[in-house]
Amino acid sequence: MLHLDHLAVSCENLNDGRDWVEERLARSLQPGGKHTKLGTHNMLLGLEEGVYFELIAIDPDAPDPGQRRWFDLDDFSGAPRLTNWICQTNDIDAALAKAPIGMGVPMELTRGDLRWMMVAGEDGHLPFDAAFPAVISWGSSPHPSTRLPSSGLKLRQLTVRHPDAETLRANLGPILDDPRIKFEQGSTSLEAVFDGPDGEKVIS
């Protein structure tokens, strides 16, 4: 089975992306780190119920990784936006066996004492125009959410829109059971609604 792990906003520049996110969530993002294998860097925000939020961009100081980056970052342009959702599993091979063609192969990644396996699409492109989630397995590594102070924000609903939402739902139905996740027909996009002590916050 899959369980929601985190949400990712992509941006062209991490500093500009931070301002964009912090204005909408009224929370300060925490320093993240660098993904040396893929030439990206990020910032993070802890959410309730073991979920976290990631802001990610190409690291301008990193060398060319020699492969396409995850989350379609090589093709990303424009304003920051919610581009991806990531689900965790204890058995990444079993999850991939039930996933659609185009998921790619597991990649082993490290940062400090964090060790994880991730599948983020062939050449950085996830199925269903990236409306299908990336899949991650933390194994015995500590989960990032345990190290982040809680922002007090709790995900109420993640809406996943796609022109073929019914097929997307059918593909995920056997391996994902989460009432917070809603599928709608429409142009491909994601929208996350959070509840907090200071009211509703929306990121899309």
Image (cartoon, rainbow, N blue to C red):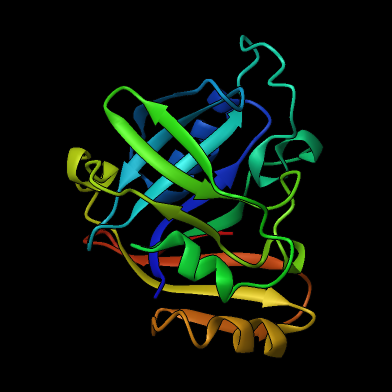
In this picture, is 117 found above or below 19?
below
Q: Residue 11 occupies which quadrant of the picture?
A: top right
Q: In front here: 89 or 202?
A: 89
Residue 154 is situated, as x and y percent measured from the top left of the image, at 29, 64
In this picture, is 20 found above or below 83?
above
Q: In front here: 114 or 15?
A: 114
Whether residue 114 is visible, yes or no, is yes
Question: Which residue is drawn at the image coordinates 74% and 22% (left, top)?
Answer: 66
Residue 185 is situated, as x and y percent measured from the top left of the image, at 72, 85
> Would you say 202 lies left or right of 131 here?
left
Give the quarter of the figure containing the C terminus: bottom right
Whether residue 200 is visible, yes or no, is no
> Would you say 47 lies left or right of 149 here?
right
Question: Which residue is drawn at the image coordinates 77% and 83% (left, top)?
Answer: 164
Give the quarter of the figure containing the N terminus: bottom left
Q: Residue 47 occupies which quadrant of the picture?
A: bottom left
Question: Which residue is drawn at the image coordinates 76% and 79% (left, top)?
Answer: 186
Residue 194 is situated, as x and y percent measured from the top left of the image, at 37, 65
* Picture mark count: 0
Residue 72 is situated, as x and y percent measured from the top left of the image, at 73, 44
Question: Which residue is drawn at the image coordinates 40% and 79% (left, top)?
Answer: 180
In this picture, is 89 found above or below 159?
above
> Would you say 43 lies left or right of 153 here?
right
